[in-house]
Image (spheres, helix red, strand yellow):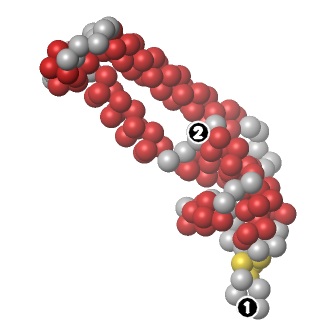
Amino acid sequence: MKIGDLAKTAGRGVETVRYYEREGLPSAPARSEGNYRLYSEAHVERLTFIRNCRALDMTHEEIRAQLHFKDCGGQDCGDVNTLLDEHIEHVARRIAELQELEAQLQALRASCGQRRSIDECGILRGLGEPTTTPENAGTHHAAHLRSTHAKRG
């Protein structure tokens, strides 16, 4: 099958398949005489595996490790368990950070409980203050979370 068929069968876009290929996640496909990539059912299975890992917010590094474990076979799954345990810890830390961020946003929202002139808006004043105090550090944490998530890509 060609890349469009693979993408459709695996529930992904062609650009996503190409991106994963550039990242080295699926195995290289065979080529036709016309130099078209030819994908097999094994590619569909691998792309489905990658898609499921991404749905669990695993990084490409974590996916590569899981694929390596899957491809090697013959071992016990202790390393797989360890990798997933580490990912669970990461998710728990992110949840805690997001809960802290939510509390900070709620506090910021509470600083302006009624309609006022823009000059008197507690939210805008809070956002303009230095981010070193806990009650207005939300913007710092939001940037941190965005950068953390972007690095995990």
Residue at 56% across, 31% down: 86
Helix, strand or loop status at disc 1: loop
Tag 1: amino acid: Gly
Residue 72, labelled with which disc? none
Quadrant where the N terminus sits is: bottom right
- Looking at this view, is 11 or 39 the one in front? 11
- What residue is shown at x 62% (from left), y 48% (from top)? 63
| Residue 86 placement, left or right of 76 | left
* Quadrant of the image occupied by residue 33: bottom right
Where residue 149 sits in the image (x, y, percent)? 45, 39
| Chain-order first, disc 1 or disc 2 | 1
- Residue 125 in sight: no
Q: Is residue 59 above or below residue 44?
A: above
Q: Amino acid at mark 2?
A: Asp
Residue 46 figure quarter: bottom right
Which residue is disc 2 drawn over? 57
Asked which quadrant contains residue 108, the reply is top left
Give the spatial CA distance, label 1 vs label 2: 37 Å
User: Label 1 neighbourhood size at 10 Å, few (<14), some (14-19), many (20+)?
Assistant: few
> Taking 103 as reference, is 52 above or below it?
below
Image mark count: 2
Residue denoted by label 1? 34
Report x, y in % for residue 18: 61, 67
Q: Tell me where residue 12 appears, x and y as whole percent.
A: 69, 56
- CB under 8 Å between discs 1 and 2: no
Write the residue at 51% across / 29% down: 90
| Farthest-out residue, bottom | 33
